[in-house]
Image: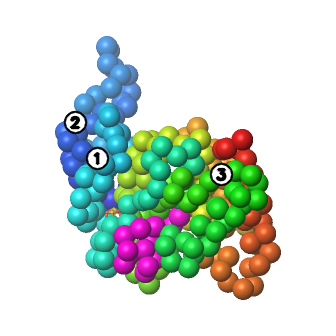
């Protein structure tokens, strides 16, 4: 872990009011854990007791923990039902999302809404977009819509981790390869991972295509596959 990333972690924990971290050490007589004053890489993330989406939002504040803050208009935290059994996770905000502060509101977002609502309707499941929760791995728009860097995803992923722990859904939908990698650690591309059940902690994760990929005309067969993935996901969560 490089020094910048370690510093980001430590600032994150200081912001949470955590002043002492513990790291595993070789057992010595009578001890298994040694307290270390903010010097060990804290993985996996610690979550404050009684965490809530409001608390996470407060802790994010005017976040500058990674370089993505430089080009953003605003932080795009997440939207929807915080008690939803289903959470959609994308990669990061685009231009429309950055302007409005809401995830998935541009063309890709409209397609996602259609996919959720039309599939649900066809399958006889009463479900609207506002019934699910939608967020991204990183909360600030990467410049030129580039893929977020691993260190950016790792720093901002702490907030996603807390969002998912707080909502504790029955299933998660990873939209695209970047979200799939960030959630599950699997390195294969989305075409290999889609349609499969993976895991984030103990929660099943269905990987499917990012809607912006489906907007490209040459990806029409992928659209059919994404609809199939969504159908399986909705039946798993709502049957
Ligand atoms: S992307 Fe996340 S960690 Fe980076 S500045 Fe934005 S809110 Fe903070």
Residue at image mark 1: 55
**Residue 3 visible, this orientation:** no
Which numbered disc, 2 or 3, marks the residue that appears first in the sequence? 2
Q: Nearer the viewer, residue 94 or 145?
A: 94
- Residues at marks 3 and 1 touching, judged by CB atoms closer than 8 Å: no
* Distance in Å between CA atoms under marks 3 and 1: 30 Å
Q: Nearer the viewer, mark 2 or mark 1?
A: 1
Quadrant containing ligand 1 reads: bottom left
Give, as a single range, the part of the protein colored magenta: 90-103
Relative horizontal placement of residue 128, taking residue 37 as reference (left or right)? right
Query: Is 100 part of what is drawn in magenta?
Result: yes
Q: Residues within 10 Å of mark 2 (few under 14, many from 20)?
A: few
Q: Which mark is residue 122?
A: none
Q: Is residue 215 above or below residue 226?
A: below
Residue at image mark 3: 126
Label 3: element kind: loop
* Residue extending farthest top: 30
- Residues at marks 2 and 3 touching, judged by CB atoms closer than 8 Å: no
* Distance in Å between CA atoms under marks 2 and 3: 47 Å
* Distance in Å between CA atoms under marks 2 and 1: 20 Å
Residue at image mark 2: 20
């Amino acid at each position: 872990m490089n020094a910048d990333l370690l510093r980001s972690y430590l600032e994150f924990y200081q912001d949470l009011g955590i002043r002492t971290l513990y790291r595993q050490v070789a057992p010595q007589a009578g001890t298994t854990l040694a307290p270390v004053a903010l010097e060990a890489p804290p993985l996996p993330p610690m979550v404050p007791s009684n965490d809530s989406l409001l608390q996470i939002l407060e802790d994010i504040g005017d976040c500058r923990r990674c370089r993505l803050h430089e080009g953003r208009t605003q932080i795009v935290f997440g939207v929807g039902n915080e008690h939803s059994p289903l959470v959609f996770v994308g990669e990061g905000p685009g231009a429309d999302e950055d302007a409005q502060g809401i995830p998935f509101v541009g063309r890709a977002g409209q397609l996602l809404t259609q996919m959720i609502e039309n599939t649900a309707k066809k399958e006889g499941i009463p479900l609207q977009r506002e019934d699910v929760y939608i967020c991204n791995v990183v909360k600030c728009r990467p410049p030129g819509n580039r893929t977020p860097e691993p260190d950016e995803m790792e720093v901002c992923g702490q907030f996603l981790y807390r969002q998912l722990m707080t909502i504790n859904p029955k299933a998660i939908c990873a939209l695209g390869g970047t979200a799939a990698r960030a959630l599950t650690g699997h390195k294969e591309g989305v075409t290999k991972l889609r349609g499969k059940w993976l895991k984030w902690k103990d929660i099943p994760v269905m990987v499917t295509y990012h809607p912006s990929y489906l907007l490209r005309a040459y990806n029409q067969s992928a659209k059919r596959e994404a609809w199939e993935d969504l159908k399986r996901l909705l039946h798993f969560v709502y049957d």
